[in-house]
Every structure is written in structure tokens, then in C-alpha cells.
Amino acid sequence: MNQQVEQDLQNSWQERQEYAEKMLPLIGKLYRNKAIEISVYGRSLLNASAIDVIKAHRTVRLHEGQKLRLRESFPILAAIDELTLAPAHVDIGKLAYDFNYGSGKEETDLQAFLEQQLAPVLNKTDDQEPQDVVLYGFGRIGRLLARLLIERQGTNNKLRLRAVVVRGGKDGDLEKRASLLRRDSVHGPFNGSITVDNERKAILANGSYIQVIYANGPQEVDYTQYGIKDAIVVDNTGMWRDRDGLGLHLQSKGAKKVVLTAPGKGDIKNIVYGVNDSEIADNDTIMSAASCTTNAITPVLKALDEKYGIANGHVETVHSYTNDQNLIDNFHKGERRGRSAPLNMVLSETGAATAVAKAYPKLAGKLTGNAIRVPTPNVSMAILNLNLDSATSKEDVNAYLQHMSLFSDLQHQIDFTQSTEIVSSDLVGARAASVVDSSATIVADKRLTLYVWYDNEFGYSCQVMRVVADMAGISAPSLPA
């Protein structure tokens, strides 16, 4: 490589770094002050580093076959910062690509272009009152929900984590709870500062004051004495899954609605956001966010059924071990689950295949399912073996799902990868409910085998957050439409 080529490469990289570094404060300010979440072709830039911004821009070429330069997207971001906008998810990658290379390339006035593309939220006022949120339980999902709620801190934040309810209360308990929020073996360190207020039994995290309430049941809690009112209580314990049990939360003073982070029983609505969230009504007080696997497979199944029709199929989940299994061989009431989780693949079962029908009734009775628990702590895979109503090809299926991941109402639920080297640990922290592994797709006439990854902790928690926001009456459209 000659010296000039080497210098050009260095200059190009430095230019990208400089633009990415200029973007970061704008991205943060838009989110915290206006509740505008910025992304590039579906890759959220919330709490991103400069390198994350550069990598997100590189994905555009995979989708469009055309490079998108940071110097082309930065003016879009800077102009958005000057606009008065209601809360929204804004994809500056799509806007920049359209303005420079797509249908908007004939438009020379950037201001006019953005006003047209962002019209649904332009010059709109946001008078939504902040919503108090309480986490009942502070395990794997509870702590991730806490992280997601805390990262939204800002003057325009509408979902405010006010309290966490746990059993216990022994000396040192508060410090241990805070430490588990601060450090996570799977998801890494907390992005910010955490301190403990022992006198008031509270955790202080990035400006959030989180009251820790010790109770053995919902009936013992009076949220109003902590200044909490009309709260949405997110039950992460799984102790109660029917209306009578979850209804105990509504007996607590200051609680108004309940969201369960597990499949609900009886007549409780099981919501897979993006699929049947239209069923959430203003007068609903108890709601289930279904299971991680149901959230992973239902959006993809819905998309495939609408395009090709699904005659029947089988879902096999390869699922990371969970806390209800044993570290070493010991008694367990469940079959096989008493065997050491880190040492064995454990044949298990899943209700997700039948649970799909609760969110998407068109597939009722068409799916069977089973599960294998494997020795990994997080990120799972669903293998969808489907018989379709119409013949297709690998290329057609992948092109369709790629389009759905970018330009459909399911863009926050379905992600897409073309990598032939991706493995489970690469997907820790994925915000989408599922990630289609397109290189592994197999099609033979009307038979389709699809491999779908999902972060069964973080991706699911993001889906729960969408349900909570909807129950709070908070909406943020994805733009450009």
C-alpha cells in the first residue's frame, strides 16, 4: 500500500470519527429533552459510542448497496435539533439516504424535506403527564427494566421509575440490590452512577430516586406514602398469573394498572407488541406481556403468514438456561430440570407455540413446539419448521423479511442479519424481539426452515417497555413512515 492511499484511509476514518463525536451530544439532547430516539436503519443510537455510530452507518450498504456517509446524515440530525417535535423514533439513516439517493434527491431544501417527512410530529405539543412505574420484583427482568427506565431520564421523560418492591430487608440487602443493578455478568456494567441512601432505603441512579420497599405481598404496600400515584406496577415475580392474583396489586393504594412479565392465564390479554397491541384498551387494568419466546416468534410468524400463508409447523426453541434450573444436580419438581444447567442440554417443553394463537389467532391449532435448554446464560434461538401455502425461495423469503425489518410496522420487533459468522454472544443486548439469521434459511418449495435469534432477557424487556408505554397512553411514531 503506497503512502497516499494509507493517508487517505486515515483521513477518511478521522472524518467519520469527528462527525460521530459531533452527533453524540445532539442524540443525547434530543432524547432527554424532546423524547426523540435517533436510529440508523433500525440501529438505535441511544447511549451509543462514536464507534457505534460509525458501525450503524456501515449497515446501510448491506441493505441498500450504497454507502451512507456520516457527513450526509449529520446535517439531517442538526436540522432535526432545530425543529419543534413531539416524541418519536426518527431514523436519520433512512432520511439521509432518501434525501441524497432516493426519492427525495430532487429536493434541494433540507428544511422543507424534513418538515414533510416529520409532519406527524412537527410543531406538536406534548402535554402527557409523567407516569409513575413500580417494579414488583428485582430479578433478571426487573433489573433490565430498571436500566431501560433509567436510561430515559430527562426533562421530557414520561415513564418514571419510582420504586422497587422486594422481599427481605436484612442488613446489607440494599447494597446487594444496588450492586446487582450496577454489575451484570451478561449485560455488563450499568451505564452511569449508582449510590445507596440507607437512611431512606433508596437507590440513586443517574438522577433517579428509586424507593426500595420491602413487603411480603402487595396487600402490605401503600405507594401513596412515598408520593407515588396511579402507578403501573410491573410484576416480574411470576408468583401470580391469573386475574385474582394480579388483582392484589390493585388493592395497593397508589397502584392503577398491572403488567405481568410472563404468560397470563384465564381471560388476561397476552400482548406481543407489534402484533396485537391494538387490543390494549384504556380501561384495561391487568395485562400480560407474554413470554420471551412468544415475543420472538409471533412477529416473524405473522409476517410469514401474511405473505405466504402457514399451513402448519413445528417450533423448536434452543433456550439458554434460566434461574429455575439447578446449578448442580439436585431435586427439582420439573422433569429433567434437576440436572446441572451449565453442564447439560436439557430437553424441556415450551407453551410458546400454542401461546402464539393468543396474540395471532389465525395460527390456532397449526403449531407444535418443544424446547431444549442449553448451557449458555443468555440469548436463545427458535427454529421454525413451517409448511407454507405457497411455494417460495430462500432469496424471496430473506428479501421479504429484510424489508419487514426496516420498513414495516414490525420494524422494532424483527431484526435481520446477513452475517455468516454471528453467534449467540454477538446478540446480547439486541433490542428487537427477534433477529432473523438469513444465511441459515432453508427453503424447499413450500417447506421453510427459519432460524431466529432472540435475547430472551434484554430483547424481551424492550417489548415489555413498549407494553408499559402503551398502557400509559404514551405513543411515539416511527418516522419516516
Image (cartoon, rainbow, N blue to C red):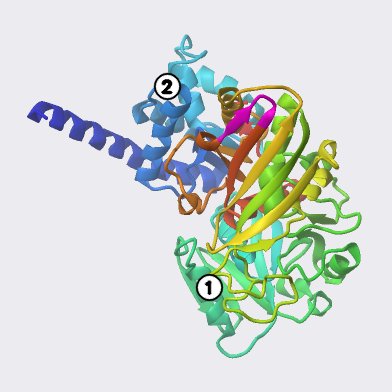
Q: Is residue 321 left or right of residue 53?
A: right
Marks 2 and 1 in Cβ contact (< 8 Å) = no
Q: Amino acid at mark 1?
A: Leu
Spot occupied by residue 17 in the image (x, y as percentages of width and height): 29, 39
Question: Looking at the image, is 154 positioned above or below residue 416?
Answer: below
- The residue singled out by tag 1 in the image is 180
**Number of labelled discs?**
2
Q: Secondary structure at mark 2?
A: loop
Q: Secondary structure at mark 1?
A: helix
Spot occupied by residue 117 in the image (x, y as percentages of width and height): 58, 22
Check the picture and name the quadrant holding the N terminus.
top left
Residue under the image location 56 percent in, 73 percent down: 203
For residue 238, what is the image quadrant? bottom right
Residue under the image location 53 percent in, 81 percent down: 175
Question: Looking at the image, is 266 positioned above or below residue 72?
Answer: below
Query: Does 446 lie within the magenta span?
Result: yes
Residue under the image location 54 percent in, 56 percent down: 151
Query: Which class describes the residues within 10 Å of circle 1: few (<14), some (14-19), or many (20+)?
Result: some
Q: Is residue 200 left or right of residue 238?
A: left
- The residue singled out by tag 2 in the image is 65
Q: Is residue 49 left or right of residue 320?
A: left
Span colored in magenta: 441-447
For residue 162, what is the image quadrant? bottom right
